[in-house]
Image: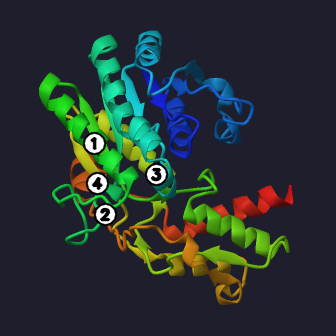
Amino acid sequence: MKTALITGITGQDGAYLSRLLLDKGYKVYGLLRRSASSDIIGERLRYLGIADRVQLIGGNLVDMPSLLDAVAEAMPDEVYNLGAQSFVKSSWQQPRVTTDVTAVGVLNMLEAVRRAAPRARFYQASSSEMFGQVACSPQNERTPFYPRSPYAVAKLYGHWITVNYRESFGMHASSGILFNHEGPLRGIEFVTRKVTDGVARIKLGMQTELRMGNMDAKRDWGHAQDYVRAMWMMLQRDEPGDFVIATGRSVSVRDMVQMAFECVQLDWRRHVVDDPGLRRPAEVHELCGDAGRARDILGWEPEITLERMIAEMVEADLARLRR
């Protein structure tokens, strides 16, 4: 039986990854940052019916001693570092917290693994936001980075420090440069979930409008279930490396909104309101990933289409609100 330690286990990706690993026979530990909301923090794990199958260990990415203790307790074969302050908008409001957790937290986790479990394989959750103001499209592993938010800058540090530890210490450390990935477990603050929740509320008569920011931005959206499978596949290789994980299809926010409203037979133009206050200080206009390397080396392909994913999210929000 292999053992895995997941930071960010209570988030969307952590929950889906936990289920995947449990289904493969792993023993799964999760790093849990203690908080006053501990009664609801594991809601995603409960949603998937696996809350009683994972073992949570107290710890914090900004506290090195707690990470050393967590790694020593779990003695993992694989470590998946998914924990971060991951909401782009909040990174302008909380740049220092974002830097401490999303950047320096990666260094802390790498160092804890190097000291306490040096043979463990390490996965770092990098982000397509690192590409930012792109010079060419689609983006692959050789595309230059141009981050456009404190979050993206912090992610870029985490990405490069992972490369550095791999090259400096011979660690089996890989990064997945994941483009946007969603699902019913996505946080309500992210645009896809904001849209599907809003659509469900409008359909049920709970509100009449959906306020949106930049509708022209384009993103490459996939399903988190497909993307956590790619994470696992990276750590099964004998050689570590970095991989872009994406669908290769870029769709505007406007088109995604239209898809969601069509799921409930409503005209989006009757309900969506443009709100300039929701726009970012520095916008990333278009992201589209080239996952050719992951396809050729890992054998990875996305299986869930954007239309299917949006329909699943709308149905999940309708069911939740009806309850």
Q: Where is residue 209 in the image (x, y as percent from the top left)?
A: 73, 78
Q: Are marks 2 and 4 in contact (CB under 8 Å)?
A: no
According to the picture, the residue beneath numbered tag 3 turns out to be 91
Image vertical order of residue 68 relative to residue 293, above or below: above
Q: Residue at x 28, y 47 (%)?
A: 156
Q: Which of marks 2 and 1 is nearer the N terminus?
A: 2
Q: Which of marks 2 and 4 is in front?
A: 2
Q: Which of marks 2 and 4 is nearer the N terminus?
A: 2
What element does badge 2 sit on? loop
Q: Which mark is residue 132?
A: 2
Q: Position of residue 142 (x, y in %)?
A: 15, 57
Image vertical order of residue 115 relative to residue 7, above or below: above
Q: Are marks 2 and 1 in contact (CB under 8 Å)?
A: no
Distance of label 3 from label 1 (alpha carbons): 15 Å
Q: Residue 244 carries which label?
A: 4
Q: Where is residue 77 in the image (x, y as percent from the top left)?
A: 36, 20
Task: Name the amino acid type tagged 4.
Answer: Val
